[in-house]
Image (cartoon, rainbow, N blue to C red):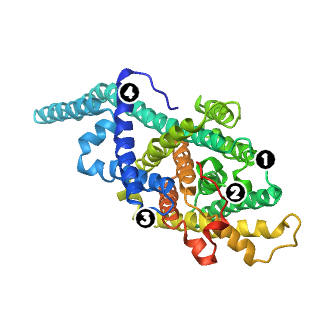
């Protein structure tokens, strides 16, 4: 259960947070300044955060500076050194006793004494490492909760007072169908192709589909209706409740549900204006989003995960599910429900409309969900790594579907893009 207690662990949380957030925020700013990602700040946050997280993880920092990595992220350095010294002393005692030509029973007795001496040191080492793991988990959970809360608040500030457009039912069907299709499709594929357990496959499918269901993270439903506050109220619990179940045995579950409920309410944000919106945007995309992505990537040992076939399969499944499968399901939903006052559209029109809204920013929701799933446990790092890699590729190819379908920029809803 992620908890923070001792001042030493609080100091460790500050160090880890600085190692993850500061470089990721700086790189995200550089990417935005260079206008490298097509869609701007959301894509820059995802790409920069994952790059810095990989560099700060066990696959890079753990190899280049192992002592520093152990001290910052793993913990128990003093306990490990004490155990090493004790092992050396005990081996010397055992060698000295064997040189005196003693009986085997004497050696067995000394070995039992050594085990009794080493047991409390090993327990202290395990306790120190568990405490540091709680720090890392608490930091990642806190970043994810704040990112969800503030991004939803940012959305409330920019969209309050707007009425629901007339075709809300049509776009709601398309959005729900896309979420369910991606979640079920990715989960079933993981179950069949990777040998995952049903629980593991379910969480993998949720993490893959979560970005599209989180409108506060720019992963909106197709059309202007995806920006309405009414649909925000539907999508927020759809994302928050399953993620909160990960922490049902810990205080983070009720806290997460409470935070999402407050963030999704209009009174919580009704008194803020343009300055608050700018401050929230800077906090979400300049600090929290890069930090969330860095925290998620830092949990992956790239040297152990990337070369495996399981990672490659998870990457392909997550990428196809979050792009082609989502595109097709959205187009199908738009085709099934007739627009208000018009006849049923042809297949070409819904496919172009769905392609116009295959925007970047969806990867941020995927990464945040993958981080919480990883903290909740029970999912192999290869699957989590596949979701993270798919999120980066999704951000880099945000405009591909508009190019393929011939969708124009004016096919998208007008007005500023928030969260």
- Nearer-N-terminus badge (2/4): 4
Height in image: 206 above or below 18?
below
> Circle 1 is placed at which residue position?
163
Q: Nearer the viewer, residue 2 or 319?
A: 319
Q: Residue 144 placed where, x, y %?
A: 53, 41
Task: Name the quadrant containing residue 97.
Answer: top left
- What number is the disc on residue 221? 2
- Nearer-N-terminus badge (4/1): 4
- What number is the disc on residue 308? 3
Mark 3–mark 2 distance (CA, rounded to whole Å): 35 Å
Task: Name the quadrant containing residue 257.
Answer: top right
Query: Mark 2 or 4, which is nearer the eye?
Result: 2
- Nearer-N-terminus badge (1/3): 1
Helix or strand or loop: what does disc 4 sit on? Answer: helix
Q: Are marks 3 and 4 in contact (CB under 8 Å)?
A: no
- Mark 3, Cα crowd under 10 Å, few <14 / some 14-19 / many 20+, is few
Helix or strand or loop: what does disc 3 sit on? Answer: loop
- What number is the disc on residue 9? 4
Query: Mark 3 or 4, which is nearer the eye?
Result: 4
- Mark 1, Cα crowd under 10 Å, few <14 / some 14-19 / many 20+, is few
Q: Residue 311 placed where, x, y %?
A: 47, 63
Q: Nearer the viewer, residue 13 or 373?
A: 13
The residue lying at 55 percent from left, 56 percent from top is: 361
The residue lying at 77 percent from left, 67 percent from top is: 334
Query: Mark 2 or 1, which is nearer the eye?
Result: 1
């Amino acid at each position: 259960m992620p908890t923070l207690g001792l001042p030493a662990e609080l100091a460790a949380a500050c160090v880890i947070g600085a190692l993850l957030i500061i470089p990721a925020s700086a790189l995200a700013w550089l990417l935005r300044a260079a206008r490298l990602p097509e869609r701007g700040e959301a894509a820059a946050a995802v790409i920069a955060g994952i790059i810095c997280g990989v560099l700060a993880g066990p696959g890079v920092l753990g190899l280049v500076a192992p002592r520093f990595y152990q001290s910052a992220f793993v913990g128990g350095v003093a306990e490990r050194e004490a155990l090493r010294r004790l092992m050396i002393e005990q081996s010397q005692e055992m060698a000295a006793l064997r040189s005196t030509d003693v009986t085997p029973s004497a050696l067995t007795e000394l070995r039992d004494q050594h085990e009794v001496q080493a047991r409390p040191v090993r327990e202290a080492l395990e306790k120190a490492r568990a405490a540091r793991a709680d720090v890392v988990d608490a930091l990642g959970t806190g970043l994810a909760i704040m990112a969800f809360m503030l991004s939803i608040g940012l959305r409330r500030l920019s969209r309050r007072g707007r009425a629901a457009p007339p075709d809300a039912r049509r776009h709601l069907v398309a959005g729900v169908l896309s979420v369910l299709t991606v979640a079920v499709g990715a989960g079933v594929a993981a179950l069949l192709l990777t040998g995952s357990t049903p629980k593991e496959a379910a969480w993998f499918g949720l993490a893959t589909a979560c970005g599209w269901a989180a409108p506060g993270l720019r992963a909106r439903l197709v059309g202007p209706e995806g920006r309405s506050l009414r649909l925000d109220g539907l999508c927020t619990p759809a994302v928050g409740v399953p993620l909160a179940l990960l922490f049902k045995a810990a205080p983070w579950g009720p806290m997460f549900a409470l935070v999402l409920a407050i963030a999704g309410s209009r009174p919580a944000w009704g008194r803020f204006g343009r300055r608050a919106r700018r401050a929230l945007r800077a906090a979400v995309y300049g600090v929290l989003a890069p930090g969330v992505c860095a925290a998620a990537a830092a949990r992956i040992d790239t040297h152990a995960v990337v070369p495996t076939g399981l990672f490659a399969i998870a990457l392909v499944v997550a990428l196809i599910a979050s792009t082609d499968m989502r595109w097709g399901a959205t187009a199908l939903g738009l085709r099934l429900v007739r627009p208000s006052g018009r006849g049923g559209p042809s297949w070409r029109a819904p496919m172009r409309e769905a392609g116009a809204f295959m925007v970047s920013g969806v990867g941020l929701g995927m990464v945040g969900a993958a981080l919480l799933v990883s903290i909740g446990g029970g999912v192999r790092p290869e699957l989590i790594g596949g979701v993270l890699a798919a999120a980066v590729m999704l951000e880099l190819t945000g405009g591909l579907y508009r190019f393929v379908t011939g969708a124009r920029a004016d096919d998208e809803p007008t007005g500023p893009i928030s969260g």
